[in-house]
Amino acid sequence: MMREIWTPELTSGAAWLDELHYGIAISLRRAGQAHDRAFPAAYTSLVADIELAFREEEKRMDDADPALVKSHREQHARVLRGLHCAHTQVLDGDIALGREIAIELLPRWLGWHIAAMDIPLAKATMHYGNDNASTRNPCISVS
C-alpha cells in the first residue's frame, strides 16, 4: 500500500513551488499505482514530469542567492542522473527498482529537498518579489 505522498507539511511557503511539488506527488502516485505492464511508461512519464518541474523551478530561482542556486541545481542534477540511470534498467524489465524509486526513495527525498532546499528558495524568491500568483502546473499530465 502506498503512503500519502503530498501532505500539508510539505508546503514551502511559495504557491508556485508548492504547485510543482504537488505535480511531482501526483506523478509519483500514478507511477506507484501502475500495473507492471504499464509501469515502464509510467516511469517514463514520471521522469519527464520531474524534468519539467526542475526546469520551471530553476527558471524561477535565477534571482536568488547564487550559492543557494548552485547547490540547488546540483541536487536536481544528481537526482536526474539517478532517475536516468534507473530508467534504462526499468525499460529492460527491472520494475522492482522503478517501484522502489517511485514509492520509497523519491517521496523521502522530496520531503528532505523541500525542507533543506525549497523552503530557503521560497524565502529568497519572495524576498526578490518572484512569488507570482500560481499558474497551471505544467508538470501535471492528466491521463
Image (spheres, helix red, strand yellow):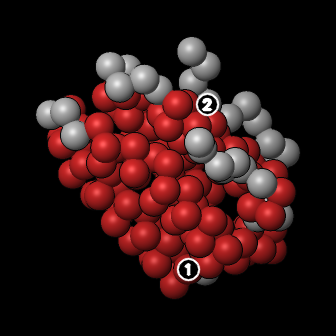
Secondary structure type for disc 1:
helix
| Residue 84: image location, x then y, percent | 26, 48
Is 94 drawn above or below residue 131 in the view shown?
above
| Residue 37: image location, x then y, percent | 32, 19
Foreground residue among 17 and 22: 22
* Residue beneath the point at 31% across and 43% down: 96
13 left or right of 55 in image: right
| Residue 29: image location, x then y, percent | 58, 37
Furthest residue to the left?
92
- Whether label 2 touches label 1, CB < 8 Å: no
85 left or right of 142 in image: left
* Residue beneath the point at 67% across and 74% down: 115
Which residue is the site of mark 2?
140
Secondary structure type for disc 2:
loop
The CA span between labels 2 and 1 is: 26 Å
The amino acid type, in three-letter code, at marker 2 is Ile
Is 64 drawn above or below residue 134 in the view shown?
below
Is 2 drawn above or below residue 58 in the view shown?
above
Give the quarter of the figure containing the C terminus: top right
Which residue is the site of mark 1?
68
Q: Nearer the viewer, mark 2 or mark 1?
A: 2
58 left or right of 60 in image: left
Of the numbered discs 2 and 1, the one sitting upstream in the chain is 1
User: Where, by quadrant of the figure, is residue 94 drawn?
Assistant: top left
Is residue 108 among what the camera can see?
yes
